[in-house]
Image (cartoon, rainbow, N blue to C red):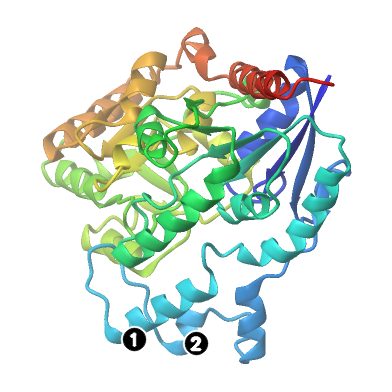
Amino acid sequence: MRRLLFLSYYTPPRAGVATTRTRQLVRYLPEHGWEVQVVTAELPGADENVIQTPYLDLSAAVKQAVGFGSKSAHATLGVAVAPKGQRLSLKQRAFSFGYTLLNYPDPEVGWFPRGRGVVGELLRSGRFDAILSSSPPFTTNLILASLTPKIPWVADFRDLWSDSGYYGSGVRNAVDSVLERWTLRSVDAVTTISEPLARVLRSHRKDVPVEVIPNAFDPEEWAGVPFELGDACTFLYAGQFFQGRRDPRPLFEAIRSLIDDGTILADEVRVDLYAKSEAWLTQAIEVNRLQPVVRVMGFVSREAVMAAERRANRLLVLLWEGANTEGIVTGKLFEYLGARRPILAVGGPERSAIDDVLTTTQSGGRVRTAAALKEAVRAAVEEHRAHRVPIVDAEHLIPFSASTIAGSFARLLDRVVDAQHIARPAI
């Protein structure tokens, strides 16, 4: 069996949907001939076979040094978080610039100096046949690029770096592009989650293969989670809003309109948001007079979210338009596939890679207009009134199962290792 060094910041039990890909690969790659050694930043509660490196949280260290303690820097300095589309004040721009400098290229940059030392020792041991890195955070790539590995390295991009729609600064994107090209000089192959993202990545290293390996769900994790039906027709969203880039307000407006025209009653519809409460979100709920309808649940255990997803009538994916957003396929979509409840995607560009997933799995659809969204909400409520909520056919989900995706990674790893052996024959 070949041995893989897997460098991933998002490793269970670290919070976040990004840990899903790591967990699945660790579980299923051995079935395809690869023994996995995970390396991550300091992580209490991690499995004993996970190698943890020391880690310095730069933001926390600076906050302690200047006397902020555990308080939010935004709150301490009196700087409001600006939602998407709002012009930044001078104070907000200054705060954003300072935060970016401290946390460049990402908030996990404090992992670099100490993680590099541990990873370097592991590479020098000669025990591994290949490396797999998972990003973001892109500090993962910096650690490996600084070591110039002598064994094949596959860099997995769950999201874009310099071409990401999350950053609006042209200067920031330009600097990211230079650093990204430098880190990719040592890779043997790149993977990403959708074809639109792959096309962008191919422009950075035309001589390196870029392969699409989508995200996945693990059917085994859902074995004990029952299908249930709640008292009200429930629309569920789990994840982040990214200061309103993922915007639930069109859904609020559609529900308000349907209540006002008498199509539905307020007590027969619910919106459960498993996300952090933010000022703009509270305001949007109040403006639409939906306080009895919308519940902001905060972040809870994954088990609790999974149970809620199987009780929901519709699972929400919120999209936005912008540069390269057609290739964004949120990892939460695949957890939704595991729940096997209908998915409702809202907004986004004219063409989205999410459409392909929904079509292949026959698990839902996407709406981009107010009229279509109102109709989707009305149809869901009508289903609930009839005590009928569809369950997605498991056969349609096989292409996105964790074992299937692990097999794709294993075949790619085998190819890059075999290619190196051919290029460097034994003497």
Within 10 Å of disc 1 (Cα), the crowding (few <14, some 14-19, many 20+) is few
**Is 341 on the left-hand or right-hand side of 300?**
left
Residue at horizontal 64 percent and vertical 41 percent from the top? 133
Query: Could you tell me which quadrant the C terminus lies in?
Result: top right
**Is 397 on the left-hand or right-hand side of 369?**
right
Residue 88 coordinates in the image, percent (x, y): 27, 76
Can residue 169 be seen here? The reply is no
For marks 2 and 1, give the CA distance. 13 Å
* Residue marked by disc 1: 91
- Residue flagged by tag 2: what amino acid is it? Thr
Residue 8 coordinates in the image, percent (x, y): 67, 45
Residue 362 coordinates in the image, percent (x, y): 37, 15
Within 10 Å of disc 2 (Cα), the crowding (few <14, some 14-19, many 20+) is few
**Residue, far front:** 427
**Is 287 on the left-hand or right-hand side of 293?**
left
Q: Nearer the viewer, residue 165 or 5?
A: 5
**Residue, far top:** 395
- Residue flagged by tag 1: what amino acid is it? Lys
Say whether marks 2 and 1 touch (CB < 8 Å): no
Vertical placement of 135 versus 20: above or below? below
Query: Could you tell me which quadrant the N terminus lies in?
Result: top right
Residue at horizontal 46 percent and vertical 72 percent from the top? 100
